[in-house]
Image (spheres, rainbow, N blue to C red):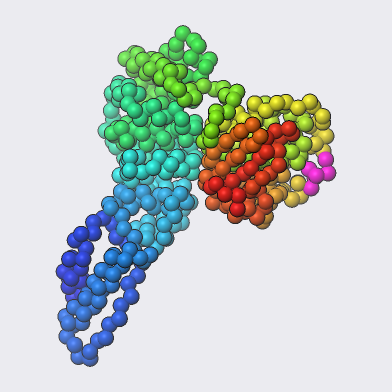
């Protein structure tokens, strides 16, 4: 039969064409025109078909048409699929037939599954060849629970159980490397995944990298707050609690049990001391500080929550600037987010900007605003955002913003946070202007249709003129 003869002949014929093309090749389709002579021998027909296929193959490879996609290796192919599913770098759907079984799960679940099953893809994403923006984008796309689920999978795939003292020794070496110095500028929301990436880039084994990322992130989040740093040092109980938390995050009881080991405690104290020194001696904002800066630095400042600027017109429209002082308004914005994200929001440059504005003389009571006819109208327009009869300021603020989105007024709170407010960008303030440039907004067309881009009036009464851009453009 032809199907038995053709593969062998095609393999021999295609070898000269493919010998210089290394990696993963995916072809959407080849167009063939074949004239078969009646009575031809089966092998002659096979050779003719093979020749036509090879000619078409040579054409698409040489022309690099949109009918072919090539990756240098399996790792880059799997990495490309992760970026594709998360919407970071879109590729053609037909180019990923190997991952067809994942089409029925969510994008985030698919990304975690591929990165867990294909650790070479995660290493590829962590190399110097990949822009750091890709790692930041993945970290922003995956929730903390997603990232921890990935790390738990990574520890399960490597049954070798290293000693905790060896893990802490690796941590000490990592702190001396150039990779650690780049962690200071990372937002707390993205720190866990970025730590994992930098550890892999540093050459750390997969399982140890997951443990170290969770440990260092936990240190930065809890163990080294200003209050802790001002004390005489962590107690034995605090050290045990610290490793217990890391063990719970990764579902590794042996990590939690190691907290009672005196040698582990000694090494952990030394590690904490080193991180404190590096955190306070660097030129960037200390990653362990719980406060926000009084002044926004000169020039464009990166922000992982630049999308929050979209709420400023709603603050004016609702008159919240007359009822809330700057810290109160900042807290209302922070309360929009789930508890696990609130620390990251609090430390973001946008919140620093809100908190530093001059406080207005109080002109209205908050209860008066919450009881207006307009609020009642928002309840009807955005019913999905009002879970009970009590209207919080955060809910009201989000509802006013949602009411200005064409076709999306009935959207849920998680959707609005994910698609519009928890979006990266750059903030630049001069004496008379505040420019917020959103660098990643898949639903930018909705903002454009709703009039959210371009000049937006004053950011607050007597404040700079607000301009919101999308990738440097107002339209």
Q: Is residue 37 left or right of 416 when viewed as pictured? A: left
Q: Can you name the residue that lies furthest to the front here?
A: 431
Give percent across and percent down for residue 88: 45, 49
- Magenta residues span 372-377
Residue drawn at the location 64% of the way across and 31% of the way down: 431
Nearer to me, 401 or 211: 401
Q: Is residue 374 left or right of 332 when viewed as pictured? A: right
Residue drawn at the location 63% of the way across and 53% of the way down: 448
Residue 374 falls within the magenta-colored stretch? yes
Q: Is residue 190 left or right of 2 when viewed as pictured? A: right
Give percent across and percent down for residue 36: 25, 86
Report if residue 340 is visible in the image: no
Note whether 429 is above or below 283 in the view shown. Answer: below
Note whether 86 is above or below 39 in the view shown. Answer: above
Note whether 341 is above or below 60 in the view shown. Answer: above
Note whether 115 is above or below 273 in the view shown. Answer: below
Give percent across and percent down for residue 50: 22, 75
Q: Can you name the residue that lies furthest to the bottom here?
A: 38
Q: Main secondary structure of the magenta part?
A: helix
Q: Can you name the residue that lies furthest to the top here?
A: 232
Nearer to me, 107 or 245: 107
Residue drawn at the location 43% of the way across and 41% of the way down: 133
């Amino acid at each position: 039969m032809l199907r038995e003869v053709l593969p062998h002949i095609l393999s021999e014929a295609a070898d000269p064409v493919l010998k210089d093309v290394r990696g993963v090749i995916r072809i959407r389709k080849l167009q063939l025109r074949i004239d078969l002579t009646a009575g031809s021998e089966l092998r002659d027909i096979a050779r003719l078909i093979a020749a036509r296929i090879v000619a078409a193959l040579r054409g698409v490879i040489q022309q690099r048409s949109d009918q072919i996609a090539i990756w240098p290796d399996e790792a880059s192919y799997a990495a490309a699929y992760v970026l594709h599913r998360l919407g970071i770098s879109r590729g053609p759907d037909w180019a990923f037939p190997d991952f067809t079984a994942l089409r029925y799960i969510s994008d985030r679940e698919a990304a975690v599954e591929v990165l867990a099953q294909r650790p070479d893809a995660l290493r590829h994403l962590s190399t110097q060849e990949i822009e750091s923006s890709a790692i930041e984008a993945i970290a922003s796309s995956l929730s903390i629970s997603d990232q921890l689920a990935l790390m738990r999978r990574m520890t399960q795939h490597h049954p070798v159980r290293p000693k905790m003292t060896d893990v802490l020794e690796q941590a000490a070496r990592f702190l001396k490397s150039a990779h650690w110095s780049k962690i200071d500028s990372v937002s707390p929301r993205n720190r866990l995944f970025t730590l994992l990436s930098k550890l892999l880039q540093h050459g750390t084994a997969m399982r140890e990298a997951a443990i170290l990322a969770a440990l260092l992130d936990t240190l930065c989040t809890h163990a080294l707050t200003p209050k802790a740093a001002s004390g005489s040092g962590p107690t034995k109980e605090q050290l045990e609690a610290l490793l217990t938390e890391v063990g719970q995050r990764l579902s590794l009881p042996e990590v939690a049990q190691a907290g009672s080991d005196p040698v582990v405690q000694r090494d952990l104290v030394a590690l904490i001391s080193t991180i404190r020194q590096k955190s306070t001696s660097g030129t960037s904002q200390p990653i362990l500080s719980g406060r926000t800066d009084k002044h926004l630095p000169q020039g464009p400042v990166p922000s992982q929550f630049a999308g929050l600027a979209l709420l400023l017109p709603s603050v004016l429209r609702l008159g919240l600037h007359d009822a809330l002082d700057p810290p109160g308004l900042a807290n209302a914005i922070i309360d929009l987010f789930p508890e696990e994200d609130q620390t990251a929001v609090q430390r973001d440059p946008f919140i620093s900007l809100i908190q530093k504005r001059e406080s207005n003389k109080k002109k209205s009571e908050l209860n008066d605003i919450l009881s207006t006819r307009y609020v009642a109208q928002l309840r009807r327009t955005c019913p999905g955002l009002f879970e009970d009869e009590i209207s919080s300021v955060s809910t009201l603020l989000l509802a006013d913003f949602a009411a200005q989105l064409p076709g999306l007024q009935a959207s849920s709170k998680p959707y609005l946070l994910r698609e519009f407010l928890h979006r990266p960008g750059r903030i630049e303030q001069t004496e008379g202007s505040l420019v917020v440039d959103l660098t990643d907004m898949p639903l930018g067309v909705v903002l454009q249709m709703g009039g959210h881009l371009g000049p937006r009036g004053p950011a607050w009464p007597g404040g700079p003129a607000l301009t919101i851009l999308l990738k440097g453009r107002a339209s």
